[in-house]
Image (cartoon, grey):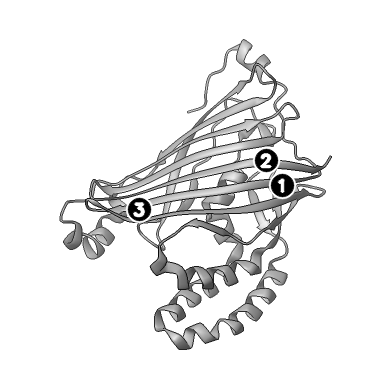
Amino acid sequence: MAIELTNEQIDETSGFKYAWYKKAEYNINIKSYLTLGTGKANQTEIEEDWTIVPGEYHHITIHSSPQRYIQSDGQMQPFYEILKEVNKATQVLEISLHPDKSIQEVTNKDEVSEKWNTIKKDLHFFELVKESYETFIRIYDKEFKDIDDNIKLNFLYQIMFYPLPVFRGGGLGDEIPSRTTLSILFPGEKLRYDTQYKISKKDEGGYTVHITAKNKDGQSQFESVYRDQYQRTLGSSLDYAYSVEGEYTYNGDSVLSEIIFHVKEKLNDNMFYVCRYHIKLNKKVSV
C-alpha cells in the first residue's frame, strides 16, 4: 500500500535527489553473528573500501579493496584465503543502474569472467589439497557464470543501490517493489521481502531514509528443507522470521554519506543469524 503524505511532508522532501560525487571512497564494515543452541557458533567482522566513480547514463564503476578480517573463526582461515583470491575477480565492477538506483546489469562481465578463469587455475592447488575446497570453488564457478543475478541478489549491493521510488520519477509515497535476496541459513534458497520507508529532512541539511522490511512469503517455502537439514539437530519446530532495519543518511549535496542496516534471519530460538552493515563516506576524492 502506498504511503499517504501531507503537503508539508511533500514540500519538506521536494529537494531530495539522486547524486554521487565524481569520485568518492566508502568504508564498509560488516559484522555478523551466528548462534546454534546456547553457544556462539561464529562471529565475524570484515572491512573493505569501495571507490565509486559514476559515469554517464546511470553507469557506475566500483573499485573494491581486499577484505580485511578484523575478527574471524580460525578454523575458517583456509576458506578465507581462497575467498580472498576469488574476490580479486570483482575488484573492478562496472554496473548499469535502473532509474530508481537498483542494479540493471554488470557491464564488464566478460572481463570479470576472464579474471575468474585465470584465478580458478591458480586455485586448483587447493582443490587437490581437500575435497571441500573443490566444492567451495565449484560453487563460485557457478556464481560467476550468472554474475548479473548473483550481484543483484547480494545484500550488500542491494543496500548500496536501493530502489527508492523518488529516484525513478515516482512519488515519495509510492511503494518499493518486493525484492529477492539469498537466505543465509538455507544456503542456495531465495527469499522475498517487502519494504516500508520514510524520508525526512534533517535540520542541519540533507535527508534521512528509514527502512523496515520483512519476509513476504512466510515460512512454508522452507519447511521441507528445515525438516531435512535442521529438525533433528535443533529439536524445535521451525519458527521462521526475516527482518531488516536500516537508515540512510544523505548530506546537504543529496549524496549518500552513511548507511546502517541490521538484518536478522531466525529459524527458531535455537538458531539465528544477525548481521550489521555499516557503510560510511570516507572521503570525497574529487568533486
Query: Quick one: label 2, few (<14), some, or many (20+) residues within 10 Å?
Result: some
Residue at position x 16%, y 52% in the image: 236
> Mark 1 to mark 2: distance in Å?
6 Å
Disc 2 residue type (three-letter):
Leu
Residue at position x 53%, y 38% in the image: 260
Q: Is residue 183 visible?
A: no
Query: With respect to residue 174, does 140 lie above or below?
Result: below
Q: Residue 46 or 140: which is nearer the viewer?
A: 46
Query: With respect to residue 197, does 11 lie above or below?
Result: above
| Extreme residue toward the bottom, this view | 128
Residue at position x 67%, y 63% in the image: 91
Q: Left or right: 214 with respect to 219?
A: right
- Rendered location of residue 145, percent (x, y): 58, 72
Q: Which mark is residue 281?
A: 2
Q: Secondary structure at mark 3?
A: strand
Residue denoted by label 1: 25
Disc 1 residue type (three-letter):
Glu
> Mark 3 to mark 2: distance in Å?
28 Å
Q: Secondary structure at mark 1?
A: strand
Q: Left or right: 68 with respect to 225?
A: right
Kindly check if marks 1 and 2 are in contact, taking CB atoms under 8 A apart as contact: yes
Residue denoted by label 3: 34
Q: Is residue 192 visible?
A: yes
